[in-house]
Image: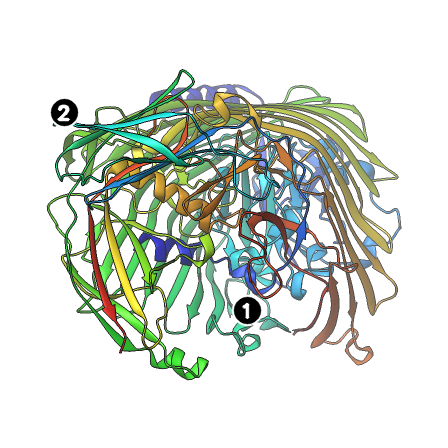
């Protein structure tokens, strides 16, 4: 809900009159900062933790990766999972594991003596009851090819504050408009029956559509919501003043240690 | 407090009765052509070499010892009216002045003193906006706009185009009190700031007070824009209108009973949507305003005025959604003369600003509304003790209701449920007392005190937090429900006001002023310029009143018998307890907004140079401001001082109009300003597929400089000269040399013209958005 509102509110009417062009900005580049990206879910898999650094604004290519860091995740049941570097900056456990709902997971990263930590609970997520699809008549007419929309049905728990991150896939490809779109929301003003909310992407005949719903804690929601603010901002006088997303990692790093339960459903457009 | 006021009054009466017996000459000064009272008209007593000016209702009062006096009534653009009176008893002396536009030619007629109001009066840092002048100048899309004119005054800065927000001496737009017939306007913009809510046809007088603010005004930190509308022609039926490319307006005014009562009705509507028929996204976009006024001037002792403003902006995006927002005001006023020396104005004021946002969708449909409503009772007294002392005192009581937001589903299958943010209310009492005193012929002082009691009251729900500054882990430990009018928190403040004028000689003076201002209504906005969707909140449990202290000193000089007015003013302003927000604050529909507040401080200082040419074929003004504005907010920019978002070092505005002959007038506007401070990325990083900007600090960079030239030409067709029905054509060009003035810079992944990403998406590029290219316009104006 918030993302739709944010989108409408950030649609400056002045777009009607405005023009734009590319310019070169000259700023004093900052000293490199560490970025941690970790995602632990209740799927049985070898979860990934990625450690990188900031790069100069105009520096293209991969941002610098941090190797030789020691990365461990432990839970409140006494389990410890050691993550080893598999590709530059990318760390995975040797054996797959699934995080359990209700447990607390602690991340510890040691980079040459610099200690970064984070702690998150795995909160439950409601289930996606079903997905349906339907022909999107208006867009089909315009585009002259059959366009389908996918609709989601679920029940939103009313007795607590919930935070969600959604990911939409078309044939295993994650759709996010090349990094210009994100769907993260809280449940303010959301009622119980979610009957057919439309996914924000188009699908074609034969596609496999997949919707994933991630549970977020308040801290990881704050991070992704701040990212959404940056992604949707135009930097204009009506936009919120830019700031780095608030991270849940202690010790001097940006990024997020996200521990989520996932509910996913797929449907084939036939 | 009342006891103090009565004692002072008694003391003054006592002083008076002990002195020699005096009589009072009083009355109203009006425009002979339409009966409109003239605000600020001078009444000069030759024998005493002093005088007074008419107040906001056109009333003056002079208490003198018996004798024969030669009075001169004057007003800019009108013929001077000399009158001799023999004062033997109280005299009701109303006058009507005849307009004479030839007076604006380069002819010296009048004696020096009467005209040098800018040098004479203690008023400093107050800009009188000349409505007639504003109408003659080039304007955006041909719509004359007083807010655009305000933005060109010295000491006033904007952050570019497309917004009606203006920043006065380092203060933000929410620190400006904008009044229309004493009713506050919460958002003065139409169409996202391209136009303002003020229809130039209905405005009689407008004053911008940047400093030296008298004690009868209060409620905002940085400025007061006091706009008064016309009463309506009380002599004959008249009207005017204009048809422009984007909007049209019409006004009808006339007597209900000649010279006693009149009315005025005006409306304006834009039709931008007609031009956007081809546009995919926007199906409706328009605004409209209506101004109405009715007045009944029974006699000099009793006059009644009822005025109202109603306006709305509406935008609709096909079948997806719609917004609308607008102000509604109504003012009922009663002017009463207790005797010739005590003028009273009693007002009942209503004002409401509301907005609505609708999303049309069977599943995601909702309606989101919010509003702020206020009702005030105001009693103002002016006691004209003698020509050297004018005492003003009064009371203003306001009840405000803050409705920060309500969401309601607008379809049966909507995923949304009815949710409402806790409302809150406030009671605001202000008492003021001020005196304007001529100590000697050279030295005049205006001093006063404003005392306010502000109470945040229920019905409301207030939460208590474990850490009221933690906006990540918000832990409510308690919640308290307050009943109707139950006090949540009370604040008391005293605002001293002082200004002085020292006449160096007949045509130059030095002025100094100090004012403390207090603000108890806070705009909840964390962008540089507010959106109509930002809501207001009262001082309360988590927000303290904002305060400001301003000092100003200036030198004022008139040359060639007031043909040229020059001034140089220096100011220093300190802002305390400014309501600011943490980084990434969520200001929309947030029940826990309290944890996002941060108390900031600000400081600004500057030099304002101003020159105006009042007569001749070429008239206009030049204003230059050199200023600095900085802020300090805990948690922002590492808690260190940073340039305020409106810190623009140099600002130059030139406004000129040239009358070629009786039919043709040319106008030009030139603005130049240093680019506004900006936060630019100092690095980038990746999180999943997102290529994000890395920031350190705030406002460490600047946008490129801003400059623009607008030109206009107004032509009166030959056949219309001197006739009752007259028309004119105005051709204007906005941004005549097509400067690409930066509006903002944003970043995105490097793309080609079609929106396809170039490369692997790791390369970023910065894009400059600029708003208005060269824009010509044509407007046809009529009046009868």
Q: In this view, does B594 lie above or below B686?
A: above
Give left or right: position of B204 versus A89: right
**Closer to the camera, B547 or A93?**
A93
Instruction: Identify the residue position indicated by label 1 in the image.
Output: B253
Confirm whether residue B499 shows in the render.
no
Front: mark 2 or 1: 2
Task: Pinpoint residue B50: horizontal percent, then vertical percent.
Answer: 71, 31
Task: Pinpoint residue B642: horizontal percent, then vertical percent.
Answer: 56, 26
SS class, disc 2 = loop
Name the chain letter of the residue that bears numbered label 1. B
Bin the neighbour count of mark 1 within 10 Å (Cα to Cα): few under 14, some 14-19, many 20 and up.
Answer: many
Q: In this view, does B477 lie above or below B658?
A: above
Where the C terminus of chain B falls, by quadrant?
bottom right
SS class, disc 1 = strand
**Closer to the camera, B146 or B57?**
B146
Instruction: Identify the residue position indicated by label 2 in the image.
Output: A78
Name the chain letter of the residue that bears numbered label 2. A
């Amino acid at each position: 809900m918030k993302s739709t509102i944010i989108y409408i509110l950030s649609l400056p009417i002045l777009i009607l009159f405005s023009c734009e062009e590319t310019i070169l900005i000259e700023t004093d580049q900052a000293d490199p900062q560490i970025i941690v990206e970790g995602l632990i879910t209740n799927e049985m898999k070898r979860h990934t933790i990625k450690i990188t650094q900031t790069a100069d604004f105009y520096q293209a290519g991969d941002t610098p990766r941090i190797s030789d860091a020691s990365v461990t995740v432990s839970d409140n049941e006494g389990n410890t999972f050691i993550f080893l570097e598999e590709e530059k900056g990318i760390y995975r456990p040797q054996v797959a594991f699934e995080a359990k709902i209700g447990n607390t997971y602690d991340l510890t990263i040691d980079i040459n003596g610099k200690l970064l930590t984070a702690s998150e609970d795995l909160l439950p997520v409601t289930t996606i009851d079903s997905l349906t699809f339907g022909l999107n008549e208006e867009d089909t007419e315009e585009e002259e090819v059959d366009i389908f929309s996918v609709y989601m049905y679920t029940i939103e728990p009313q007795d607590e504050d919930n935070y969600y991150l959604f990911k939409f896939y078309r044939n295993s490809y994650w759709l996010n408009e090349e990094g210009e779109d994100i769907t993260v929301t809280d449940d303010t003003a959301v009622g119980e029956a979610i009957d057919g909310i439309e996914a924000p992407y188009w699908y074609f005949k034969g596609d496999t559509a997949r919707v994933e719903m991630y549970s977020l804690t308040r801290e990881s929601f704050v991070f992704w919501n701040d990212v959404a603010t940056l992604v949707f901002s135009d930097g204009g006088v009506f936009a919120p003043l830019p700031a780095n997303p608030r991270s849940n990692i202690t010790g001097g790093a940006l990024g997020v240690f996200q521990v989520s339960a996932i509910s996913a459903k797929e449907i084939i457009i036939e | 407090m009342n006891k103090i006021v009565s004692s002072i009054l008694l003391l003054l009466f006592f002083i008076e009765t002990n002195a020699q017996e005096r009589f009072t000459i009083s009355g109203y000064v009006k425009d002979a052509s339409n009966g409109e009272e003239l605000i600020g008209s001078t009444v000069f007593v030759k024998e005493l070499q002093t005088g007074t000016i008419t107040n906001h209702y056109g009333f003056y009062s002079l208490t003198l010892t018996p004798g024969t006096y030669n009075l001169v009534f004057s007003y800019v653009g009108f013929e001077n009216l000399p009158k001799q009176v023999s004062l033997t008893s109280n005299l009701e002396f109303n006058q009507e002045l005849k307009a004479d536009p030839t007076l604006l030619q380069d002819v010296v007629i009048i004696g020096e003193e009467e005209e040098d109001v800018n040098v004479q009066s203690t008023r400093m840092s107050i800009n009188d906006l000349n409505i007639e002048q504003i109408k003659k100048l080039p304007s955006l899309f041909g719509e004359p706009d007083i807010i655009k004119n305000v933005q060109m005054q010295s000491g006033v800065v904007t952050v570019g185009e497309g917004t009606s927000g203006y920043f006065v001496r380092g203060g933000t737009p929410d620190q400006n009190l904008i009044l229309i017939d004493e009713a506050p306007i919460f958002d003065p913009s139409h169409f996202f700031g391209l136009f303002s809510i003020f229809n130039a046809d209905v405005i009689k007088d407008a004053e911008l007070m940047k400093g030296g603010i008298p004690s009868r005004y209060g409620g905002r930190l940085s400025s007061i824009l006091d706009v008064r509308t016309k009463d309506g022609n009380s002599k004959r039926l008249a009207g005017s209108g204009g048809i422009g490319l984007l909007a049209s307006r019409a006004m009808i005014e006339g007597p209900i009973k000649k010279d006693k009562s009149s009315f005025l009705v005006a409306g304006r509507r834009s039709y931008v949507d007609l031009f956007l028929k081809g546009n995919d996204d926007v199906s409706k976009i328009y605004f409209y305003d209506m101004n109405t006024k009715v007045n009944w001037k029974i006699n000099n002792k009793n006059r009644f005025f009822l005025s109202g403003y109603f306006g709305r902006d509406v935008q609709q995006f096909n079948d997806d959604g719609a917004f609308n927002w607008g102000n509604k005001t109504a003012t009922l006023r009663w002017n009463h003369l207790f005797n010739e020396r005590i003028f009273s104005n009693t007002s009942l004021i209503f004002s409401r600003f509301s907005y609505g946002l609708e999303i049309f969708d069977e599943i995601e449909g909702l309606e989101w509304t919010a509003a702020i409503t206020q009702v005030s009772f105001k009693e103002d007294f002016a006691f004209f003790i003698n020509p050297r002392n004018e005492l003003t005192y009064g009371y203003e009581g306001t009840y405000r209701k803050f409705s920060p937001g309500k969401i309601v589903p607008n379809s049966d299958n909507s995923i949304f449920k009815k949710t409402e943010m806790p409302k809150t209310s406030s009671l605001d009492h202000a008492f003021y007392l001020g005196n304007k005193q001529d100590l000697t012929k050279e030295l005049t002082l205006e001093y006063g005190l404003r005392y306010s009691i502000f109470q945040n009251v229920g019905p409301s729900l207030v939460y208590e937090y474990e850490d009221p500054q933690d906006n990540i882990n918000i832990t409510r430990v308690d919640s308290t429900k307050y009943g109707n009018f139950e006090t949540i928190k009370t604040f008391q403040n005293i605002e001293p006001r002082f200004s002085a004028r020292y006449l160096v000689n007949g045509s130059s003076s030095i002025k100094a002023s100090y004012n403390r201002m207090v603000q108890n209504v806070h705009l909840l906005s964390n962008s540089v310029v507010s959106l109509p969707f930002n809501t207001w909140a009262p001082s309360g449990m988590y927000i303290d009143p904002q305060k400001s202290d301003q000092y100003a000193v200036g030198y004022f000089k008139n040359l060639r018998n007031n043909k040229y007015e020059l001034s140089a003013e220096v100011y220093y302003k300190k802002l305390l307890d400014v309501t600011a927000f943490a980084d990434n604050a969520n200001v929309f529909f947030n029940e826990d907004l309290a944890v996002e507040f941060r108390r900031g401080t600000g400081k600004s200082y500057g030099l304002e140079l101003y020159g105006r040419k009042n007569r001749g074929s070429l008239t206009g003004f030049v204003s230059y401001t050199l200023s600095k504005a900085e802020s300090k907010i805990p948690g922002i920019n590492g808690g260190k001082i940073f340039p305020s978002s409106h810190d623009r070092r140099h600002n130059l505005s030139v406004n000129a109009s040239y009358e070629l002959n009786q039919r043709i007038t040319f106008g030009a506007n030139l603005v130049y300003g240093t680019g506004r401070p900006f936060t630019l990325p100092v690095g980038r990083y990746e999180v999943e597929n997102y290529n994000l900007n890395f920031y350190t600090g705030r406002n460490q960079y600047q946008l490129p400089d801003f400059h623009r030239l607008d030109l206009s030409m107004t032509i009166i067709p030959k056949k219309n000269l001197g006739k009752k029905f007259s028309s004119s054509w105005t051709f204007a060009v906005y941004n005549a040399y097509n400067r690409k003035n930066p509006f903002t810079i944003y970043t995105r992944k490097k793309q080609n013209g079609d929106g396809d990403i170039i490369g692997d998406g790791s390369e970023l590029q910065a894009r400059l958005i600029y708003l208005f290219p060269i824009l010509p316009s044509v407007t046809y104006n009529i009046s009868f």
